[in-house]
Image (tube, rainbow, N blue to C red):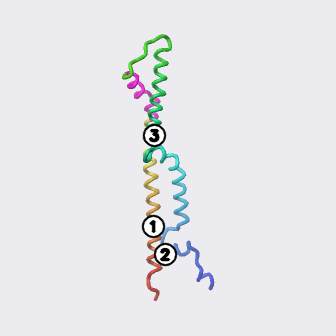
Amino acid sequence: MASSLFRTSAEIEDTAGVDRLDVLLAERHAIVQELKTLRPLYGPLGMWGHRRKVELARLTVQLVAEATKDGGKKPTDTVLDAMAHEHDDYVSFVTQGTTQAARWVELEESLEAIDMRINRGQALLRYASSEPKV
């Protein structure tokens, strides 16, 4: 009889038909673990633009070194900029960044959906507990 008086939160959630909070929090934690590296890069005030500029600078230095190693003439800044932007390393860097940014958006949406499910469950439980008992 005592067990019917003191039910676990999981039992209450199951009876009310809401998602279990412990399950939702575990899902949320897994998403946050992946987001913790993507959000600083692609989120507000993200560092991806700075990393992109560093990659362009690295390629520009490399291209100047290659062009002048045997006494060749340094290309103009405009030509160097164009060469760096079309370099395979830069194209790969931008492609990878775009893929990661898309993943960041997906994860942010998943996180928001879990938060909404948590809030919905709380609202349903509040409503169910405030109903008059007959």
- Secondary structure state at the residue bearing disc 1: helix
Left of 49 or right of it: where is 10? right
Residue at the top extreme of this rendering: 71
Q: Amino acid at mark 2?
A: Ala
- Secondary structure state at the residue bearing disc 3: helix
The image quarter containing residue 5 is bottom right
* For marks 1 and 3 on the same chain, the one whose residue lies earlier in the sequence: 3
Question: In the picture shown, does residue 27 fall above or below 44?
Answer: below
Q: Say which mark, if any, is on residue 48.
A: 3
- Front in this rendered view, residue 31 or 51: 51
- Secondary structure state at the residue bearing disc 2: helix
Residue at the left extreme of this rendering: 78
Q: Which residues are magenta?
A: 79-93
Q: Say which mark, if any, is on residue 119.
A: 1
Q: Say which mark, if any, is on residue 3.
A: none
* For marks 2 and 3 on the same chain, the one whose residue lies earlier in the sequence: 2
- Front in this rendered view, residue 68 or 121: 68
Question: In the picture shown, does residue 85 fall above or below 112?
Answer: above
